[in-house]
Image (cartoon, grey):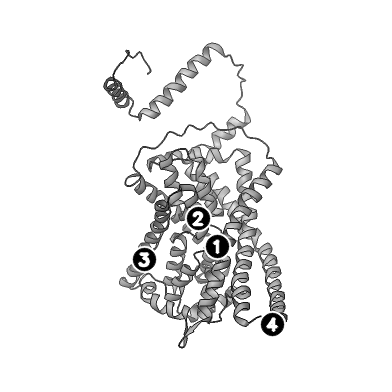
Amino acid sequence: MNGKIKPMTTLAEICTEADKLRLRSGNSLGDTIVSDIYANAEQIARKVVTHNTPGKLTWDTKLDDILTSRLFGYPIMLALLSIVFWLTIEGANIPSEIIGDALFAFQDQLTEWFKLAGAPDWLHGVLVLGLYRALAWVVSVMLPPMAIFFPLFTLLEDLGYLPRVAFNMDNMFKKCKACGKQILTMCMGFGCNAAGVVACRIIDSPRERLIALLTNNFVPCNGRFPTLIAIATIFMGGAVATELSSLTVSLVITATVLIGIAVTFAVSWGLSHTILKGEPSSLVLELPPYRPPQIGAIIYRSIIDRTLFVLRRAVVMAAPAGAITWILGNVYIGDLSIIGHLASWLQPIGYAIGLDGFILLAFILGLPANEIVVPILLMSYLATGQMMEFDSLDELRQILLDHGWTWLTAVCTMLFCLLHWPCTTTLLSAYKESGSAKWTLLAFLLPTVIAFAVCLIVAQSARILGFA
């Protein structure tokens, strides 16, 4: 390549010549081949194609020079991501409240029908206060953010911006021996990790696809954002002056997201140097032209293919979990419910990692859907027998403080929420995409071990240094 090569007849001669090329160029053989193909194509094009190049650069070339530059590319990318987050969080508040009010009002109607039918209390509790209440909670919390995030994400994809993001991030992922397209699966994971796992299909290399699949859980989905925001508002925003509260909460959430991204890079690097060894594949990416969005296609892909697809899986998992949680909270052994006994058993483990037994149990019972972790925690703290909601953050703050929460509890809970195991919907998607129970189990164990290890280090370090 890039010169005349004598004909070779044996495999040994071919391998020797390939090694010489690699040593001369300093690149992998794949990169050398791709570079040579493009060089030859350019030489041919010069002979057969003529261009009437205008004196001025076109507007899309100028835009690419900005969006893919080292100076402006990353800040613009972070700014757009922040805008999408802000629109998703702020825009979902009122729709979530409306949907929640409607669904919980229907719960009251269901209760009346059960009473008229003479149904036993336990059946009403399992089906209405357990199964239906969990379903209503997941739909009201998940649907509005996904219905906002996925159309915005699809809009950026349709405009042609997302391939520029992959181009910008390819170098960083290549250092981890992963693929630049992984950033696209991570962005999708901010909406829902299950959707992020499914999006790993865009990565051609099976090895790099598995790396993206195993690490997608480290970016927080919209099911974890309400918990993170509530805790940050109570303990971090409440520790500063009122006028600085919103800014402080925003910075804390941004720092949390950056921690998740940093863990993604670290774990990707670790996997590519251990059980998923290999060289990064060459990202041959032809940047598409900028084009006006097709609104109909955006609505269909974002709502039908993504939002409703993910919501259906989440509901299937969360509804039975609500019934089981109600049973655990209402079946008593002695003076304590089963939830109380389980929390007592988990207390030493929870304390060691900066939590308590009830918090750890809430995360375990919230495995089907992250949206129900806080309601389960309130139900457990208040021993109400059904998942609870709070009327204001002040009410939630008082409940948490009454049960021994400190700044260390808040920090460790946020870290555990960020890093802990995927929900069952994500695990189901991981199994369907990988086709392997082994990789699905690793997708569960990897974040679990990391979450426990990080929280253990933070909690014990704070106690040893006298900060808690």
* Amino acid on which the number 1 mark rests in the picture: Met
Which numbered tag is attached to residue 428?
Answer: 2
Identify the residue shown where x is 53% and y is 31%.
286
What separation in Å lies between label 1 and label 3 (alpha carbons)?
32 Å
Q: Residues within 10 Å of mark 3 (few under 14, many from 20)?
A: some
| Residue contact at pointers 4 and 3, CB within 8 angstroms | no
Q: Is residue 149 visible?
A: no
Observer-side mark, 3 or 2, equals 2
Mark 4: secondary structure: loop
Which numbered tag is attached to residue 118?
Answer: 4
Q: Residues within 10 Å of mark 1 (few under 14, many from 20)?
A: many
Using the image as rendered, state which of residue 468 and residue 35 is in the foreground: 35
Using the image as rendered, state which of residue 250 and residue 448 is in the foreground: 448
Q: Is residue 406 left or right of residue 250?
A: left
Observer-side mark, 1 or 4, equals 4
Q: Earlier in the sequence, mark 3 or mark 2?
A: 2
What separation in Å lies between label 2 and label 1 (alpha carbons)?
10 Å
What separation in Å lies between label 3 and label 2 (alpha carbons)?
31 Å
The residue singled out by tag 1 in the image is 317
Q: Quadrant of residue 391?
A: bottom right
Q: Earlier in the sequence, mark 1 or mark 4?
A: 4
Residue 144 image point, x, y percent: 65, 59
Which numbered tag is attached to residue 308?
Answer: none
Residue 269 image point, x, y percent: 36, 46
The residue singled out by tag 3 in the image is 458
Mark 3: secondary structure: helix
